[in-house]
Image (cartoon, coloured by chain):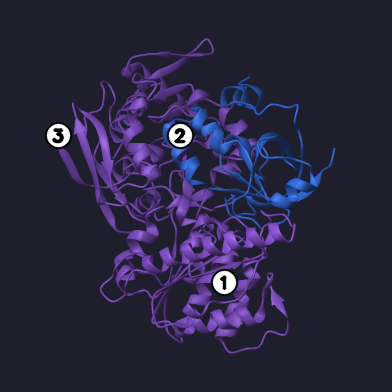
Chain colours: A purple, B blue
């Protein structure tokens, strides 16, 4: 059976490009090297419910021809005064480029999922800059890896294996052997604790207390991984040290580290639930490393402080660079959310929340971002591509989205597509169509076409191109 | 009925990731997303066992979910719900001028709801997003 190798996985921002896919009779039958989520996507993509476009007639979605769906979509957008176009992070750069052209044509607000993940990170980077690198540099050189407010085990399952602690770099060795022995030790400790609890007639399954003791391995001259989060996720098992911070206290913790790195004293016993002695020891580990990296997730961007948390994290990295080498990188979620920012920036000057309603691009997150527009009930039509805002936007925003005419371009049946007036089922980019996507470190990678899409499924870029042509045709007609 | 004041965090889980690839109307998706992960000590405080239904209420709404014992304890008085249509019903839409709604650290109240049902995706859409 033919095996397609070096396939890029179109799931998360890690964009693993070592996937092998077995194809038989235009169907993927097996996947190698992928994580659980990647494998599920490659093996389940063919379960799509609809192939033909759908249009809502008398309250029900019914199958129509592609040209009818294109005409209906173009009319909705051309008639709208202030349409929104949202999604873009799970599609190709080529589709995003056409989408931006369409947004300019109809005077829409075009926003991508950055608005609900790392929007605050981008605002912060504009304020204070960022010291970052490619993941390849980190794989080979980073000896202190800090994951802050993120859970790579669940959201980026192969990140640790491919780019950080478990990867064998040129100058830094993998820590997976230490992880295996640590797991064995933890299991024995757990059994012993249960036995003691049974003998002492205590709850055998009682949760152990949190300790802030730092293991001696953290002070050794070798690669180390630290996880900072509000709960002990599976990612913590892979880390040499887990630091549990109280919810909404990340800003205080970051500022405390900044003071310690600047050799100032903290005149309190603890910060964010962590004893100052522990913080001092971790600050020493940070200063003592050769190359450190902070990967941060939505535990920083969504919690109290939002962009100010990121300001503080980037400032900590800047301070650390006075003493050693340190970098920082957001853990981007969707596989091409970075591409959505990049393409939007080189086309309009702004990475997300771009408003074309005045005929030129305008950007003011909080005003021109879709959640705010929807909550203010200002939009009169919507186009959603490769995203599911009805499932993921706060109720008030989602309710206002589905009250107006809605076009959805998504190969999956989602809560948003079930609420739409027009639904296109495009080819899956990275499986049924080729394209380009940007990894979280801004490295562009090709997405392969592995199998042919079912007829009449077109690529997202082609569907958008046809809608754009139809909009232009409608607008060129005399009134 | 005992009620407990908690902080609500929305999170990503690997089961949610695979569930969405199976399809958002699939049983796998509902099983992995319509859940609330609670610290075992907090389960005792509200007198609940695993797999019973609980009602979570915030200033922005209320939803019934299946209770799951947290594997990441201890995290006293903090509950976790995977992102999805159920969590979105009780989220804070306030963006504080950033464009980003407040999806973590929301004050909430949790109570047993043994006689109430967890809504399926179609029922949820019918109840909350019915088009006029």
Q: Is residue A107 visible?
A: no
In this rendering, would A11 be left or right of B103?
left
Coordinates of residue B54 in the picture (x, y in percent): 72, 37
Q: Is residue A147 above or below residue A142?
A: above
Discs 3/2, front? 3
Give the x, y percent position of residue A175.
Answer: 38, 69
Q: Which mark is residue A384?
A: 2
Q: Is residue A90 visible?
A: yes
Q: Is A268 on the left or on the right of A306, as rendered?
A: right
**In the image, which is nearer the foreground, mark 2 or mark 1?**
1
Instruction: Find disc 1 in the rendering and name its residue.
Output: A312
Residue A398 or A270: which is nearer the viewer?
A270
Give the residue furthest to the right: B1
User: Which of the two marks, 3 or 1, is nearer to us in this view?
Assistant: 3
- Name the subunit of mark 2: A
Please state the chain letter of the residue tagged with numbered disc 3 in the rendered image.
A
Q: Position of residue A180 (x, y in %)?
A: 41, 63
Residue A46 disc label: none
Q: Earlier in the sequence, mark 2 or mark 1?
A: 1
Q: Is A214 above or below relative to A191?
A: below
Residue at the location (28% across, 70% down)?
A: A169
- Choose between A226 and A150: the one closer to the eye: A226
Instruction: Write the residue at 46% across / 36% down.
Output: B20
Looking at the rendered structure, whether the residues under marks 2 and 1 are on a common chain is answered as yes
Within 10 Å of disc 3 (Cα), the crowding (few <14, some 14-19, many 20+) is: few
Question: Quadrant of the image for the C terminus of chain A?
Answer: top left
């Amino acid at each position: 059976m033919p095996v397609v190798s070096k396939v890029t996985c179109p799931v998360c921002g890690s964009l693993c490009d070592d996937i092998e896919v077995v194809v038989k009779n235009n169907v993927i039958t097996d996947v190698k090297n992928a994580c659980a989520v990647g494998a599920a996507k490659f093996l389940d993509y063919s379960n799509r419910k609809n192939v033909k476009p759908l249009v809502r007639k008398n309250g029900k979605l019914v199958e129509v021809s592609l040209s009818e769906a294109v005409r209906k979509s173009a009319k909705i957008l051309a008639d709208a005064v202030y349409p929104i176009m949202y999604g873009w992070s799970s599609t190709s750069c080529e589709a995003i480029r056409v989408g931006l052209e369409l947004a300019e044509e109809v005077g829409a607000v075009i926003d991508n999922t950055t608005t609900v993940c790392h929007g605050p990170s981008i605002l912060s980077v504009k304020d204070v800059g960022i010291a970052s690198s490619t993941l390849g540099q980190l794989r080979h050189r980073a000896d202190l890896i800090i994951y802050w407010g993120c859970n790579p085990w669940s959201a980026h399952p192969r990140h640790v294996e491919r780019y950080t602690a478990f990867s064998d770099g040129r100058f830094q060795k993998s820590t997976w052997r230490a992880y295996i022995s640590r797991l064995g030790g933890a299991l024995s400790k757990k059994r012993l604790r249960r036995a003691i609890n049974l003998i002492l007639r205590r709850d055998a399954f009682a949760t152990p207390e949190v300790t802030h003791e730092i293991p001696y391995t953290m002070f050794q001259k070798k690669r180390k991984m630290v996880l900072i989060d509000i709960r002990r996720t599976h990612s913590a098992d892979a880390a040499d040290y887990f630091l549990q911070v109280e919810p909404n206290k990340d800003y205080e913790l970051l500022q405390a580290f900044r003071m310690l790195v600047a050799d100032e004293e903290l005149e309190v016993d603890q910060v964010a639930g962590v004893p100052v002695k522990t913080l001092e020891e971790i600050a020493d580990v940070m200063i003592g490393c050769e190359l450190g990296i902070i990967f941060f997730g939505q535990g920083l961007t969504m919690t109290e402080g939002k962009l100010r948390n990121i300001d503080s994290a980037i400032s900590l990295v800047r301070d650390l660079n006075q003493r050693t080498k340190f970098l920082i990188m957001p853990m981007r979620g969707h596989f091409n959310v970075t591409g959505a920012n990049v393409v939007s920036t080189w086309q309009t000057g702004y990475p997300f929340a771009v408003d074309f309603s005045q005929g030129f691009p305008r950007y003011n997150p909080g005003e021109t971002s879709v959640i705010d527009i929807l909550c203010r009930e200002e939009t009169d039509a919507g186009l959603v591509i490769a995203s599911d805002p009805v499932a993921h936007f706060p109720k008030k925003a989602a309710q206002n989205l589905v009250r107006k005419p809605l076009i959805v371009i998504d190969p999956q049946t989602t809560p948003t597509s079930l609420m739409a007036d027009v639904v296109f089922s495009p080819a899956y980019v990275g499986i049924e169509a080729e394209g380009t996507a940007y990894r979280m470190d801004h490295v562009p990678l090709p997405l392969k076409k592995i199998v042919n899409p079912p007829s009449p499924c077109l690529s997202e870029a082609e569907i958008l191109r046809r809608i754009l042509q139809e909009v232009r045709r409608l607008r060129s007609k005399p009134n | 009925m005992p009620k407990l004041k908690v902080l609500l965090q929305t999170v990503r889980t690997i089961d949610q990731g695979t569930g969405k690839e199976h399809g958002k109307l699939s049983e796998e998706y509902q099983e992995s997303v319509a859940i609330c992960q609670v610290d075992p000590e907090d389960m005792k405080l509200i007198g609940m066992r695993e797999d019973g239904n609980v009602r979570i209420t915030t200033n922005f709404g209320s939803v019934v979910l299946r209770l799951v014992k947290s594997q990441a304890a201890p995290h006293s008085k903090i509950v976790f719900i995977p992102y999805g249509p159920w969590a979105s019903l009780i989220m804070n839409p306030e963006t504080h001028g950033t464009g980003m709604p407040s999806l973590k650290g929301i004050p909430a109240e949790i109570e047993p709801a043994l006689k109430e049902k967890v809504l399926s995706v179609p029922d949820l859409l019918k109840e909350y997003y019915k088009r006029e």
